[in-house]
Amino acid sequence: MSLRFCALNDGERASSSAVRGDRSSIVGYARVSTREQTPDSPEAELRAAGVARVFVDRGESSRIAGRPQWNPCLDYLREGDTLVIRALDRIAGTEQVAIELIRDLGRRGVRLRSLTEPFLDVDTSTPMGEAVVGIMAVLAQLRVATIRENTRRGLAHARAQGRTGGRPSVMTPERTGAAVRMRADGQSIAHIARVLDVAALSVSRALVKAAQCDMPTSPGRG
């Protein structure tokens, strides 16, 4: 996996180096979800930890690599710098991405420090640091495998009980029967959806399924 580190061109990079100087820096990154009211609190937390420069993204998913402030943060980092975050999920959406990121930062000579996960404060250029990252990789793979196995077992059990996976349909037999009757009376899909207070797509799917099953329009009627 290749992570993007070079958004700046050579001129911009040289200008950035001139502005910040040659000294190593403590750089912070915060990603604030839309549920959080303000980025002030995460930023204040990072500054209290000694961070001199903070990059903040608001309302951006950690699964998106090209976040507005994340790439500039990576471009700003230099060998000898320390990147401080509140938690690993602020910068990586999956364990595997996080592991690759830790290794890439290590290859650049950048140290990663998490305010809530002290075990991340390792030097990946050392055998011990790489061992810690290796253990993280094994645990991540084990977690994914466990989730897959549990899902497989759950679906197999559901099928054995005569059920299928997924959420229950909003189109109950009563709603489907009503939809079939209204459709037979010439009502549009949009009108039926408004009457039943469901999505038009749910109505369409139910009507198709009812037609395939030759479902009666109501109990007791032929």
Image (tube, rainbow, N blue to C red):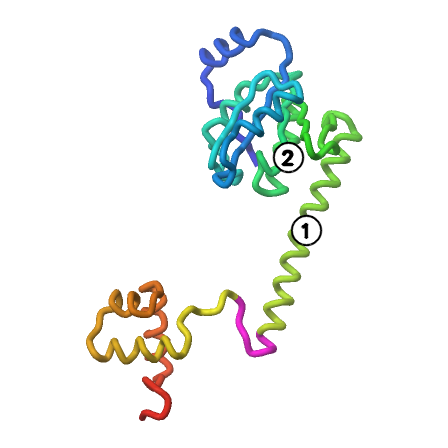
Measuring from the top left, give residue 19's x and y in whole percent: 52, 8
Q: Residue at x 54, y 33 (%)?
A: 31
Q: In which quarter of the image is the C terminus?
A: bottom left
Q: Nearer the viewer, residue 10 or 185?
A: 185
Measuring from the top left, give residue 211's x and y in whole percent: 32, 79
Say what secondary structure mark 2 lies in. loop
Q: What amino acid is at disc 2?
A: Ala
Q: In which quarter of the image is the N terminus?
A: top right
Q: What amino acid is at disc 1?
A: Arg
The image quarter in which residue 149 lies: bottom right
The residue to which callout 2 is attached is: 87
Magenta stretch holds residue 161: yes
Which region of the structure is painted magenta? 159-165
- Does residue 109 appear in this view? no
The residue to which callout 1 is attached is: 143
Distance of mark 1 from mark 2, alpha carbons? 19 Å
Q: Is residue 98 left or right of residue 37?
A: right
Say what secondary structure mark 1 lies in. helix
Measuring from the top left, give residue 24's x and y in whole percent: 64, 13
- Does residue 72 appear in this view? yes
Q: Is residue 35 above or below residue 194?
A: above
Q: In this view, does 9 lie to the left or right of 196?
A: right
Q: Which of 17 and 28 is in front in this view?
A: 28
Q: Which residue is drawn at 59% across and 43% down?
A: 94
Q: Which residue is drawn at 22% across and 69% down?
A: 188
